[in-house]
Amino acid sequence: MMYPMSNPVTIPDEARAALDASVGLGFELEARPGRSPSSALVFRACGPRGTVFLKLHREPRRYEQERHFYRSFAESLGSAVPRLVGEAPRGLVLSLLEGEPVSTLAEGTALPSRAFHEAGALLARLHALSVEDTDALSVSDALAARVAALRRDAGGLQLHAALARLEAMLPELTATALSRSFCHRDFQPDNWLFDPREGGTLGVLDFEHSRPDLWLFDLSRVDLLYLSRSPVLADAFWAGYGGAPAGDARALYEGVKLMDAARTLIWAERHQDPVFQKEAEIMGRALKL
C-alpha cells in the first residue's frame, strides 16, 4: 500500500482517525522535513489534548521494525524515546519529545559534549536489552555476506583497496563466536534530541532500522562522522558508553567501520544523494580511503 502524498497535509482516513483519538478533533497538521522522505513522511499534529507526531511508512519492513521497537522495548528506555500512542495502516502516532537535533548544535560548546555523553549512556542501555536472536545466519556468516554484497555493489567505485583489506581481515574477524544485541542501526546526531533544561536530557528517534545486530555497527557512523574529528566529543561519548571497543573487538571494529564507509559511498553514488555523499567523504577521510 502506497500513500498518495501530492498534498503535503493529506493523510489517509485511518491515520486521521488515530490522530483524532490521540489529540482530539480539530487538530492542526504540519508536514515535517525528514532525512529520508522517500521511505517515510512525518507530520506534527497539534490538537486540544496536546501534540504528537504521525509517521507514515512506505516500506512494510521498516514499519514493522519500528512498531516492534515501540511495542516491545520503549518502556525499558523510559522518557528517552517516544511512546506509541496510536496506530493506522503503516502509520505510527508517537508522543512528543522535547529538544533540538544534536546535529544542529554548535560544536565546541558544553551542550554537544553533554549530549554526546548522554547518547553514549543511552546506547549502552539499548545494547543491554534482552533480545531473542532469530536470524538464520550467524554473525560471522552475516559479516561475510555483507562483504560479498559490498564487492557486488561497488561497481566502478574506487573501493578495491578497501574491499581487499576487508576480505583479508575476514578469516580473523569471523573466527570468534559473536552474538547480536538490540541495535538502533542509524544511531547518529540527526536522530538525537537534546533538551538542556534540568541538567540536560537526550532523546532518540527513528527506530525503523532497529533489530538485533552486531553492536559495533551502532558505533561506527557516529565515530567516523563526529568522534574521529573531535577528541572532546569522543571523550564524552566513550565515557557515557563505558569505553571504546578494545581487545578482540578492536580489530573487528576497524572492519565494521570500513564496511560502513563503503556502504555509505555506494548508497550515495547509486542515489545521487548529496547528504550521503558528504558523509561518505568525511568517512573516507577518517579511514584514509
Image: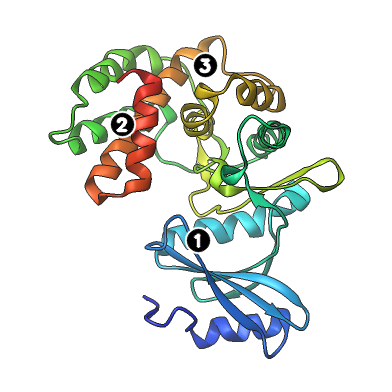
Q: Secondary structure under badge 2?
A: helix
Is residue 141 in view from this perspective? no
169 w.r.t. 227: above or below = above
Name the N-terminal-most of marks 1 and 2.
1
Q: Is residue 205 above or below residue 89?
A: above
Separation (CA) of disc 3 from disc 2: 20 Å
Write the residue at 41% across / 40% down: 136
Above or below — where is 192 with respect to 122? below
SS at mark 3 in the image: helix
Residue 148 position within the rendered picture, expressed as x and y whole percent measured from the top left = 24, 31
Separation of marks 1 and 2 at Cα, in angstroms: 27 Å
Tell me the residue that label 1 is attached to.
64
Residue 262 bears which disc, if any? 2
- In the rendering, which numbered label is found on residue 249? 3
Q: Amino acid at mark 1?
A: Glu
- Identify the residue at horizontal 53%, vertical 35% (top origin): 218
| Residue in the foreground of this view, choosing between 43 and 57 | 43
Asked whether 103 or 139 is in front, the reply is 103
